[in-house]
Amino acid sequence: MKKNSFVSGTFIATFAIILVKILGIIYVIPFYKIIGEDGGALYSYAYNVYNLFLNISTAGIPIAISKIISEYNALEMYEAKERAYKIGRNITLIISIIAFFLLFVFAEEFATLILGKISGGNTIKDVGFVIKSVSFCLLIIPFLSVTKGYMQGHEYITVPSISQIIEQIVRIAVILMGSYITIEVLNKSVSLGVGIAVFGAFLGGVAAYIYIKYKIHKNKEIFEIKDSQKNEVTNKEIIKKIATYAIPFIIVSVATDIYGLTDMTLVVRASYKLGYTAAESETIASIIATWCPKICMIINAIAMGMTASLIPHIVSSFTKNKIKETNKKFNQALNIIIIVSLPLAIGLAALSEPVYNMFYGPSEYGTLILKYTAFQSIFASLFIIMSMALQSLNKFKAVYISTIIGFITNAILDIPLMYMFKHLGLHAFYGAILATIIGYIISYIIVLYSLKKNLKFTYKEITQTIKKVTVPTIAMCITIILLKMIIKTDVESRIKSLIICIPYAIIGGITYIGISYKIGLLNDVLGKDYINKITQTIKNKRK
């Protein structure tokens, strides 16, 4: 087992993330067909509540362990390193058991919190059952995350990345086979099928954990405690260090999950009060919280994959007190998100009908919601990068303030905006989407102001990119409008939907990339050397 260099490690980790995201996008096509809209709502409820508790149990601790292991290894504090891992594992054990207990025992209370007094759709008992089913994941996934952090701290990236893929494959296999056999073969209830499906995350975690532990055992000589001075640091100091590293990540992750959970709860209740049926209210909420974001994962995955290597460079520049260079890297990260995410979002919005149909079948609400959540994903991607950059620069106070105020803004505006859109004769759920976007914008203002005030950051490069990107964006939009006159997008067949999307993606993509290259936008954002390298490679292949 070989250590990974920074470049190879980044490539492997990014490739694994993108592959896992793609698998996560593909499996929902047959799964949604099996469970239907009511089952889709159940699945959405379970995972939104589970993700909140999972992030309380794990978010930050694996990263903390990875940092501490790396730090102590570099200082040759091998005994302290192993002690830190055991302490982190024990902390995770305690938190995980408490989280599992709360989620399992109070599952129906959480279901009541989500559904309120609406009737005619899924029952409190059904929602409580699927929440109980997914709660078992809390007994394995946190340990898997900490063990990944342990290996990553030793600069072994390949094994954790492979374990991530194994986890996803096993999980998807259980989801599809379990739900199909339960619902289609045995003719059992949809709630039982969804319960078995969400339990797949537990089995996927077990498979990945066994693989990692096997690799550690097989290469145990690498991880054995070498000669070093014992008791270099006390357990109290280690616990304090874990808390210092972990708490910022936990707060951001939990706040993000509360964002989604609050949106889902408020949308369900407000939609019902505004005249939608219980079934429609649940469907709308699950589409906003789960099913459209799954399609939009391609925007986040590609954006995150392209910017993953930039964050360490930001840390390096900041550590060396090169503020101008740090500012440039920060701007470059946001610029990449803008130029990559914008055309993808426009494409998804323009093709919302065939794309949603391709994944889940015809749906009036799904098509309308995807059209706007595609753009919401751009705001989400930008927030993720800003948050990561702030934490890399140790600006934790700004992270807390921007996240919490953004969340509160979203929660306060949800219902008023839904009522406003309904009063205007439009669909109320547009108000929930707009509230989320406004929440993100408020967070951006706080982040950018904080960096400008404390580090004298400037954002001229971002402003220039926004101005320049309008040209290829408008050209792409015109191209799509002209294509719509020739190729209609209102088809019901999933195969036809896929076929229709192909010429739009190719022609729209070529238009955007070609004009971006001609006006120098790609050179400005990605760097002239990098673009020249790509164009030279293309020219060589043509020869």
Image: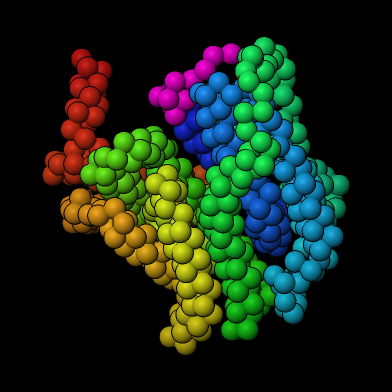
Quarter of the rendering occupied by the N terminus = top right
Q: Among all residues in the image, which is located at the extreme left?
A: 519
- Number of numbered labels in the structure image: 0
Q: Is residue 5 magenta?
A: yes
Q: Is residue 366 visible?
A: yes
Vertical side of 391 occupied by 140: above or below: above
Vertical side of 307 occupied by 127: above or below: below
| 543 to the left or right of 509 | left
Vertical side of 160 occupied by 114: above or below: below
Q: Is residue 498 magenta?
A: no
**Residue 447 versus residue 159: which sits nearer the camera?**
447
| 294 to the left or right of 317 | right
Vertical side of 110 occupied by 522: above or below: above
Residue 493 x/y as whole percent: 53, 50
Residue appearing at x 54%, y 58% in the figure: 256
Residue appearing at x 69%, y 70% in the figure: 114
Q: Is residue 469 visible?
A: no
Residue appearing at x 29%, y 40% in the figure: 321
Give, as a single range, the part of the protein colored magenta: 1-11
**Residue 75 versus residue 510: which sits nearer the camera?**
75
Residue 404 x/y as whole percent: 50, 66
Residue appearing at x 67%, y 28% in the figure: 231
Residue 246 x/y as whole percent: 58, 46
Residue 485, image quadrant? bottom left
**Residue 403 versus residue 38: which sits nearer the camera?**
403
Q: Among all residues in the image, which is located at the extreme bottom?
A: 423
| 127 to the left or right of 75 | right
| Scheme of image coloration | rainbow
Quarter of the rendering occupied by the C terminus = top left
